[in-house]
Image: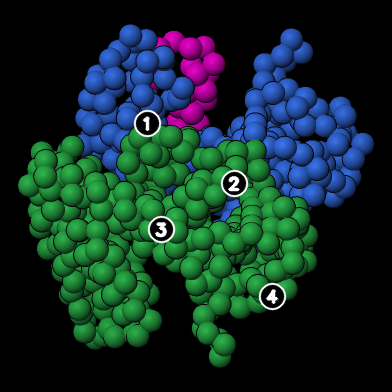
Chain colours: A green, B blue
Amino acid sequence: MKLIDGKKISSDKRAEIKEKVAKIKQQTGKIPGLATILVGGDPASRVYIQSKIKACEHAGIKSFHHDLDENSSQEAIIALIKKLSENSEIDGILLQLPLPQNKDAQECLNAISPLKDVDGLHPFNVGLLNLLKSWNEIIEKNILVSCTPLGIVHILCKSGITIDGKTAVVIGRSNLVGKPLSMLLLANNATVIMAHSRTKNLKEICKSADIVVTAVGKSRFVNKDFIKTGAAVIDVGINRTPEGLCGDVDFDAVKDMDIEITPVPGGVGPVTITMLLENTLKAFSNRRKIVA
Amino acid sequence: MKLIDGKKISSDKRAEIKEKVAKIKQQTGKIPGLATILVGGDPASRVYIQSKIKACEHAGIKSFHHDLDENSSQEAIIALIKKLSENSEIDGILLQLPLPQNKDAQECLNAISPLKDVDGLHPFNVGLLNLLKSWNEIIEKNILVSCTPLGIVHILCKSGITIDGKTAVVIGRSNLVGKPLSMLLLANNATVIMAHSRTKNLKEICKSADIVVTAVGKSRFVNKDFIKTGAAVIDVGINRTPEGLCGDVDFDAVKDMDIEITPVPGGVGPVTITMLLENTLKAFSNRRKIVA
């Protein structure tokens, strides 16, 4: 087993981003800004949002955090988002998900200006991702794509794992990971299998794949029977167990296999936050092209 | 082999639509309207557009056709689209593709009001399709989805072919067919394999599937080796050969197999045009909900 070092891939990229931010400041006198919104006090969400704010500050990106009360109305959330969409100091807006119950998250996301949609969840940006025909086009047009899928493609590239012509299985069909990742892998010329809870023969299907991405949220869900020799395994799961954080893969069970794999923690997680910084820079540059 | 009768499925649905249009006229005094645009004189495109206009007229939908010269500038196409987007008599706008060379079709499609985008190719509608989590949501929210994929799901349903839990391969990843169809099948709980020209082991992959959809554009591309016993085969190809129109499937080669299959012509084609009428009614109703 070869471990893919997400921390190293992330810190290399963050160093690049920090340099870019410094250059932007020097050349334009402007500082890219990211607004974050946390509704309610879920402890896990607070930890995530704090690491995002810290990463911004470390990279020189200005962060604007907004705490909203658990009982805030959907209208209040949308009103704040609209205000931030109009604030010219702010390039990106991140609404931390999940929202407390009885709120329609997509309705709130739809209120984010597509130009500031650093999580790539506005229908317009989702549509652009789906309509583009190649990875190059995605890069050239600076499309805002959901951070976790973007991070996964970055990990595969930096690890020298070819996507073109490979078979990739994505387990889980969420709007945040499974679906946009499928589109990114397709744009990179993989044959993509979208698998989920209704999939039959999941083991066999995964066993046929060169790349297995699991975003299920069940610890020890993926074991030896799912993975073929030589495969690359990307573990997006973050599961809290009595033994600590772990991914969807039964790590001990696969540790003697000839595979490459991202650990949890230290795999996809840090790279995801890095992509949020990258998207904030993209948004900064897209807005300047269009607005200024 | 059991033939799936696309003509019958289509004419049943068109009769329903005709009734709905009559009821709309009676209740509101309004007539749903579809604008069609043909740029240049490509004979095949002209045949398609004429069948669309004829289908509209037969269903009682008012059609507004616009012929543009082969050499019309992209700006002229967009200007016409914007004018039609503002015309309250028009519920749907269809830009016949492909456009003559040197035009950016997507730029033109982006100018269509998302509310009138009966081909489901505006990024906003593509995004809505991708973000929705189930077929029911697609129906309830009256999302405008590309006509061919919509027709294929209609054909499967009317033929009593279960999608839920099945493995479906879609060969071809176009924006008009392959990608939106993959999303529709996923929303119907299929395990979806997106295959294309860079796919290795295509035969084996197809042979594992319960549903095979081919949208490749090569006559006799899919033969016996691609199809397992009991599979449903949907042939989207329309290829002109010296022997006449044919699909992607080598029909003679599979005719003794125990499969269900759509013929070409008389399979997907007529149902696609029917879905254009259906989308025009959806657009009529969506616009009234929002505008009036």
Magenta segment's dominant SS is: helix
**Residue B58 position within the rendered picture, expressed as x and y whole percent measured from the top left:** 49, 33
**Residue A130 position within the rendered picture, expressed as x and y whole percent measured from the top left:** 45, 44
**Mark number for residue B106?**
1
Instruction: Specify start and end residues of the magenta stretch as a single range.
Output: B38-59
Q: Secondary structure at mark 2?
A: loop
Residue to which mark 3 is pinned = A10
Asked if labels 4 and 3 touch by Cβ distance under 8 angstroms, the answer is no
Task: Output the chain of dot 3.
Answer: A
Q: Amino acid at mark 4?
A: Asp
Task: Output the chain of dot 4.
Answer: A
Q: Amino acid at mark 3?
A: Ser
Q: Secondary structure at mark 4?
A: helix
**Mark number for residue A161?**
2
Circle nearer the N terminus (2, 4): 2
Q: What residue occupies the far bottom of the structure in this picture?
A: A242
CA distance for labels 2 and 1: 32 Å
